[in-house]
């Protein structure tokens, strides 16, 4: 029997390939979950106020983009002076930001949370119908990686290591079998 390197490499590389694909898919899922937008909406006096935050999961020290869309009767409301106030869990105002109208009916602001915890995001603006106010609750997580993050990374590294050892073992056995048969 001769040593068929192509067959051995194919058999040995399959577990490594599956391990690499799984790691990439899981990391892609984690990455997508982190940057996907979080959305909430509220109605007041016929106005529909939607708040979108990017990233969805807010982490201390990372900038968050807030996008508020205001419409009444399905028509975007432009030219409003929108204020965003951020209140901590003790109801203390930690920031007051004037939002800028980027496109008709869409108002943007950026903010970076320095402390983790529960926050209330207050959106308010004056209209001919009176003051419109909405509130959205959001949890800000600490910037240090979570236990599940570390566990995932350790398990992924372990899985790749096992696949590499398996691959080397298959090649070693094949070479040993060929050497034994030649003797």
Image (tube, helix red, strand yellow):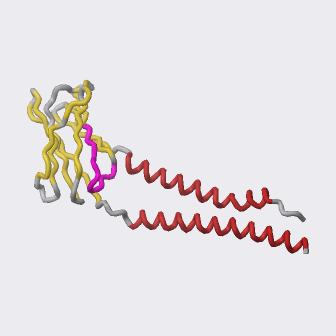
Identify the residue shown where x is 17% and y is 41%. 123
Identify the residue shown where x is 86% and y is 74%. 180
Residue 168 versus residue 111 in the image, above or below: below
The part of the image, by quadrant, that contains residue 104 is top left
The C terminus is located in which quarter?
bottom right
Where residue 31 sits in the image (x, y, percent)? 43, 51
Say whether residue 119 is magenta: no
The part of the image, by quadrant, that contains residue 75 is top left
Magenta region, residue range: 56-67
Identify the residue shown where x is 13% and y is 45%. 96
Where residue 41 sits in the image (x, y, percent)? 26, 40
Instruction: State left or right for residue 147 relative to residue 113.
Output: right
The N terminus is located in which quarter?
bottom right
Count the marks: how many? 0
Say whether residue 61 is magenta: yes
Residue sitting nearer the eye, 20 or 176: 176
Residue 175 versus residue 7 in the image, above or below: below
The part of the image, by quadrant, that contains residue 107 is top left
Instruction: State left or right for residue 34 relative to residue 159.
Output: left
Where residue 137 sits in the image (x, y, percent)? 23, 51
Where residue 74 sits in the image (x, y, percent)? 27, 26
Instruction: State left or right for residue 128 relative to residue 27.
Output: left
Residue 40 versus residue 151 in the image, above or below: above
Instruction: State left or right for residue 12 relative to residue 69.
Output: right
Identify the residue shown where x is 39% and y is 67%. 147
Residue sitting nearer the eye, 161 or 119: 161
């Amino acid at each position: 029997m001769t040593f068929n390197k192509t067959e051995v490499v194919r058999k040995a590389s399959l577990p490594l390939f599956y391990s690499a694909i799984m790691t990439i898919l899981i990391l892609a899922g984690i990455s997508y979950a982190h940057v996907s937008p979080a959305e909430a909406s509220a109605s007041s006096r016929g106005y529909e106020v939607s708040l979108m935050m990017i990233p969805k999961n807010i982490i201390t020290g990372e900038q968050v983009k807030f996008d508020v869309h205001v419409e009444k009767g399905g028509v975007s409301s432009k030219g409003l002076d929108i204020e965003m106030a951020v209140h901590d869990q003790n109801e203390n105002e930690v920031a007051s930001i004037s939002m800028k109208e980027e496109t008709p009916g869409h108002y943007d602001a950026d903010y970076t949370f320095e402390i983790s915890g529960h926050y209330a995001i207050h959106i308010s603006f004056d209209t001919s119908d009176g003051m419109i106010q909405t509130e959205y609750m959001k949890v800000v997580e600490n910037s240090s990686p979570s236990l599940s993050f570390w566990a995932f990374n350790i398990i992924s590294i372990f899985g790749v290591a096992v696949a590499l050892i398996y691959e080397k073992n298959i090649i070693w056995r094949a070479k040993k079998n060929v050497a034994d048969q030649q003797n």
